[in-house]
Amino acid sequence: MVAPQEQEDVRKIQFSGKSSYMLALPKKWVEEMKLGPSDQVTVTRMANASLVITPRSAATAFAGKGEATVGLSREEDAASVERKLVALYLVGYSLIHVKAKGGTLTSVQRNTVKEAARKHLIGTEVVSDSAEGTTIQILLSYPELSVENALRRMFLIAASMHRDAMSSLKKLDHDSAKAVIRSDDEVDRFSLYVVRQLKMAVQSDRILKEVGLSATTECLGYRLVVKSIERVADHASRIAEGVLMAKRRLTESDLNKLEDLSNSAVKVFEESGLALFKRSYDSADRVIEKAKRVTDSGKSYLSELDRRKPAESSQIIRLILEDISRTAEYSSDIAEIVLNLTAGQIIVTVTPVN
């Protein structure tokens, strides 16, 4: 299906008084927006020098004050209930009512709603709970936790997970490995929160500014950054899972080589975050080169393993090597996104198209 073309309506600016200019709004648009005399609109100056005119009613439509009610049949399991809650959370509703489609909610359904609010959805609180229905409210407002601050938390947790996973490998500490795996839930919580913010920001210029972004074009880049951080956390969890599978401690030589590679990969990952927050093209460019050196070192180590006699530990080492290399590659992906966001820094002159 062909997307509808944007309607262009050329209008002249009229002089009014000594310091004001007037622009008449198209009648059709005013009628479609259900506006009339004395109604207010907001005029927002965008980064690309354009102006966006938004009815005040529409400007507050995405303020996170909407309510949604979802009905559950008794046959719906916990996974289905959680998916529905996450979907409504991401869309931007601030009050979500979970009701039974006739009868009452099962105990599993009620517990799922409460656990999802507690473990997966940042800023939510169960405000009512009964057999007939459960309501959760999103209390966190946009300025309280910006996209950048949430991403900083994700970088910090994912990097700590990776270091703790390698520490548990050296000590063959199963309890520490299990703690790393549990930490993945925290990264997922921040991930859902950031995606919610980005979805809302795309729909409202006011929210865009409140979450700390300057243009809607940044939202896609930040969404990809979120996905890359999630993947880094997943690979840290996989290292921890390898620790749980290991029957005996690796040799000191292998542990030292894996630790050196891991430290390099985590450092590159952290530097990709710094490049993002500093908005530095040059820093991001250096991250890509460093990430390549880490993956090249991993390949060299893998070749060394191939020359050895098969050993019980070689499979675990290969899996951990893969996780370390993927961490470096996702860091490179983040750096490439930063290059795209900061490409203007390398432009000397711009020639307009005639």
Image (spheres, rainbow, N blue to C red):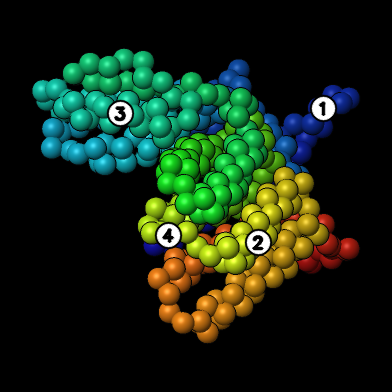
Amino acid type at mark 3: Val
Residue behind mark 4 = 248
Cα separation, mark 1 vs mark 4, equals: 79 Å
Q: Earlier in the sequence, mark 1 or mark 3?
A: 1
Q: Position of residue 335 (x, y in %)?
A: 68, 59
Residue behind mark 3 = 113
Q: Earlier in the sequence, mark 2 or mark 4?
A: 4
Amino acid type at mark 1: Ser
Residue behind mark 2 = 260
Q: Position of residue 293 (x, y in %)?
A: 69, 70
Q: Earlier in the sequence, mark 1 or mark 4?
A: 1
Near-viewer residue (141 or 262): 262
Q: Nearer the viewer, mark 1 or mark 3?
A: 3
Q: Secondary structure at mark 4?
A: loop
Residue behind mark 1 = 20
Q: Residues within 10 Å of mark 2 (few under 14, many from 20)?
A: few
Cα separation, mark 2 vs mark 4, equals: 21 Å
Q: Residues within 10 Å of mark 1 (few under 14, many from 20)?
A: few
Q: Is residue 160 above or below residue 245?
A: above
Q: Earlier in the sequence, mark 1 or mark 2?
A: 1
Q: Position of residue 193 (x, y in %)?
A: 50, 36
Q: Is residue 11 visible?
A: no
Q: Could you tell me if the residues under marks 1 and 4 are in contact, i.e. CB atoms within 8 Å? A: no
Q: Residue at x 67, y 44 (%)?
A: 215
Cα separation, mark 1 vs mark 3, equals: 54 Å
Q: Nearer the viewer, mark 1 or mark 2?
A: 2
Q: Nearer the viewer, mark 2 or mark 3?
A: 2
